[in-house]
Structure formats: structure tokens, C-alpha cells
């Protein structure tokens, strides 16, 4: 029995007692006043059914989770999903992150409390924040079970092999959770339009491409279907080698491999810069072997933003940055 119901009948009972002590005219007047009082009480008392409303969400990894509808306090332990929260105008709902080093385009969250790191979420800090909802993805997914004991938790990990579809699905899930209706539709449509234009230009260029991660002097390659395969799978750039092994850490390669493949474009992601590692190794383009490649000689070695590609994949603004950066190679 909810609070409104109890108050309504409490007022009615009091009125009946008073009515028994007065004349008929007084009873009529009191009855009219009673209706007004009940209406005022019902307007002032929160509707518990609305307050306690929930929605069941199937998250990105198949968990069916009952979460609060339009939650006020959200812990977001992934930069890509911080990005998506901002894209939907939900920045103020985020009360906790696990991002001590935020990409520049997520600087809005710099003053938000931090609970450890993606790889080691601080459970005590998380519990003390009293979140209504917790969002994990990618690196923080390992903490899912422990976090689910604190509050409803969903995993919105990005699928690098279905990049735009993954972003779209996660935006739709967030829109459902926060009761935003079709808010995400315009965002998704804009991304798809930009992607279609880039895809057409990249395919028309017919330029062969190598995507490589640079880490303290060593190189690894990423081909279609891999972590950074979005360059080929979604953006439409032709891979210089269809035989690159699919691995989260890439296929280790030598400088001689790059020369033997001789790509027209080299896209480099500097992991060292992303994590603040040893930056004493010489830049790739200073290597004499690399200087023999067509990419070097045509000034087509492009460094991609590590904060976007390595630290914030799966977000709307991140995806726009990625498309802009690779498009510069074919302008």
C-alpha cells in the first residue's frame, strides 16, 4: 500500500469524523474542501511507482540487467562510455570514473571523483559513491561481478569488428535507460553519413595502408578484423597485407617487413605517448629502413591520436576524431 493511498484514506476518515459532529451544510462545505485537500496531497506526494521504475537492458555481452529508469548517480568506468554519456547530454549524471588520465576531449570529467583505474577498480570508493547504475567496458569488464554486488551493472564493451554498430547499439541502450526517446537517432545518423563519405573516398583512393602500433621502439601490425581494423573494416582503406595475424596486441613486425610490404600510407598509434612510457626511442620516421618506403617518401606517415585510438575507443566524439585523422591521409 503506497503512501498516497494511506494519506488519502487518512484524510477521508478524519473528514467523516468531523462530519458526524456538524450540520448538513457544514458537511457539504467540508466535503468540497476535502476534495481540494486530497488533490493537493496527491500532487505533493511522489509517485512511488514512477520513482521505482526500472527497465531491463540486454548489454553488449548478453547480460539481461534490470536497471533504474533515468538514474541520477552513475559510475562510468570506461572512457568511450564517458564520451557517449556526454554526447547524450548526461555529463552531470556521472559521479565516478576510473580515469585518472583523461583524453583532452573528455576534460569535462576532470573534476569527477576517481575510483582506482580501469584494471583495478576501488570497490570501497565505488560503494561509498552510492551509484544507481555502474557501466563497465573493455578494460574494466573484469570487475563486473564484484561491481554488480554494489549496484546494477551493465557491460557496454565496444566491438572493434563492428565499430559503428557497437556505438549505435550502446547509444540506444543509454537512451532507453535515461528515457531519452529517439535522442540518439540524430547522433547515429550523423556518424553514419560521415562514415559513408569517408568510406567512399578511401576505397576510391586505392592506396595500400599499414596500421601499426609503436611502443618504445618496437612495431606491431593490425589488419582487418583486429583491434584497429576499423581503418579497413569501416573506413574502407585497403590493407597492404591480408595475412596479418589477428591479435589484441598486434602482430610483431620488423622494420624490414614494413619496407617489404611498402605501403602507400602508414598509420601509427604511439602507445608510449598514451601511457607515458619510455619516450627515448627515436621516432619511426628517423629509421633509415623506413625512410626507403613509399609512405615516407610521399610524406604519408600519419600519427594517430593515442588518447582517442588507444584510451577512448567506442565513443561518439572519439569516432569523429578517428575519422578526421585518417581522412587527412587522402585529402
Image (tube, rainbow, N blue to C red):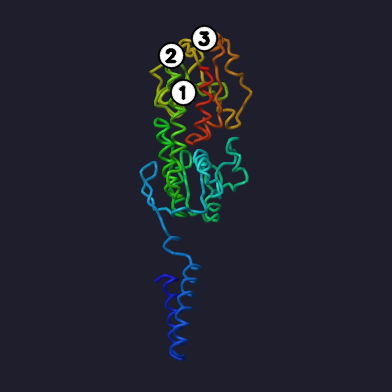
Q: At numbered mark 3, what does the secondary structure look like: helix, strand or loop?
A: helix
**Rendered residue at 54%/31% (across/down):** 308
How far is mark 1 from mark 3, CA to CA?
23 Å
How far is mark 1 from mark 2, CA to CA?
13 Å
Q: Which residue is mark 1?
A: 198
Q: At numbered mark 1, what does the secondary structure look like: helix, strand or loop?
A: helix
Residue 20, placed above or below residue 243: below
Q: Earlier in the sequence, mark 1 or mark 2?
A: 1
**Rendered residue at 41%/62% (across/down):** 49
Q: Residues within 10 Å of mark 1 (few under 14, many from 20)?
A: many
Q: Toward the viewer: 38 or 259?
A: 38
Residue 228: percent from the left, percent from the top? 46, 27
Q: Earlier in the sequence, mark 2 or mark 3?
A: 2
Residue 326: percent from the left, percent from the top? 51, 22
Residue 278, placed above or below residue 240: below
**Rendered residue at 46%/74% (across/down):** 38
Q: Which residue is mark 3?
A: 294
Residue 169: percent from the left, percent from the top? 40, 39
Q: Quadrant of the N terminus?
A: bottom left
How far is mark 2 from mark 3, CA to CA?
14 Å
Residue 265, placed above or below residue 110: above
Q: Which residue is mark 2?
A: 206
Q: Residues within 10 Å of mark 2 (few under 14, many from 20)?
A: few
Q: At numbered mark 2, what does the secondary structure look like: helix, strand or loop?
A: loop
Amino acid at each position: 500500500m503506497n503512501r498516497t493511498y494511506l494519506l488519502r484514506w487518512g484524510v477521508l476518515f478524519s473528514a467523516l469524523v468531523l462530519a458526524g459532529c456538524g450540520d448538513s451544510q457544514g458537511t457539504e462545505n467540508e466535503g468540497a474542501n476535502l476534495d481540494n485537500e486530497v488533490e493537493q496531497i496527491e500532487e505533493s506526494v511522489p509517485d512511488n511507482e514512477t520513482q521505482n521504475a526500472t527497465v531491463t537492458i540486454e548489454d553488449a555481452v548478453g547480460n539481461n540487467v534490470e536497471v533504474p529508469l533515468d538514474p541520477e548517480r552513475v559510475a562510468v568506468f570506461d572512457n568511450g562510455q564517458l564520451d557517449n554519456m556526454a554526447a547524450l547530454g548526461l555529463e552531470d549524471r556521472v559521479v565516478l570514473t576510473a580515469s585518472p588520465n583523461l583524453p583532452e576531449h573528455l576534460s569535462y570529467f576532470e573534476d569527477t571523483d576517481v575510483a582506482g583505474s580501469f584494471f583495478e577498480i576501488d570497490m570501497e570508493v565505488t560503494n561509498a559513491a552510492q551509484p544507481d547504475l555502474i557501466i563497465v567496458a573493455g578494460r574494466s569488464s573484469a570487475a563486473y561481478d564484484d561491481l554488480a554486488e554494489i549496484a546494477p551493472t551493465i557491460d557496454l564493451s565496444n566491438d572493434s569488428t563492428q565499430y559503428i554498430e557497437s556505438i549505435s547499439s550502446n547509444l540506444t541502450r543509454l537512451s532507453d535507460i535515461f528515457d531519452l526517446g529517439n535522442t540518439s537517432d540524430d547522433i547515429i545518423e550523423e556518424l553514419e553519413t560521415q562514415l559513408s563519405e569517408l568510406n567512399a573516398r578511401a576505397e576510391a583512393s586505392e592506396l595500400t595502408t599499414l596500421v601499426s602500433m609503436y611502443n618504445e621502439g618496437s612495431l606491431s601490425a593490425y589488419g582487418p578484423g583486429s583491434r584497429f581494423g576499423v581503418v579497413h573494416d569501416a573506413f574502407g582503406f585497403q590493407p597492404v597485407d591480408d595475412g596479418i595475424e589477428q591479435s589484441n596486441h598486434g602482430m610483431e613486425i620488423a622494420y624490414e617487413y614494413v619496407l617489404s610490404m611498402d605501403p602507400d600510407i602508414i598509420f601509427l598509434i604511439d602507445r608510449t605517448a598514451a601511457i607515458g612510457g619510455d619516450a627515448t626511442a627515436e621516432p619511426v620516421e628517423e629509421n633509415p629502413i623506413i625512410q626507403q618506403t613509399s609512405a615516407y617518401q610521399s610524406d604519408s606517415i600519419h600519427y594517430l591520436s593515442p588518447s582517442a585510438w588507444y584510451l577512448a575507443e567506442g565513443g561518439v566524439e572519439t569516432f569523429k576524431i578517428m575519422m578526421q585523422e585518417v581522412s587527412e591521409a587522402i585529402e
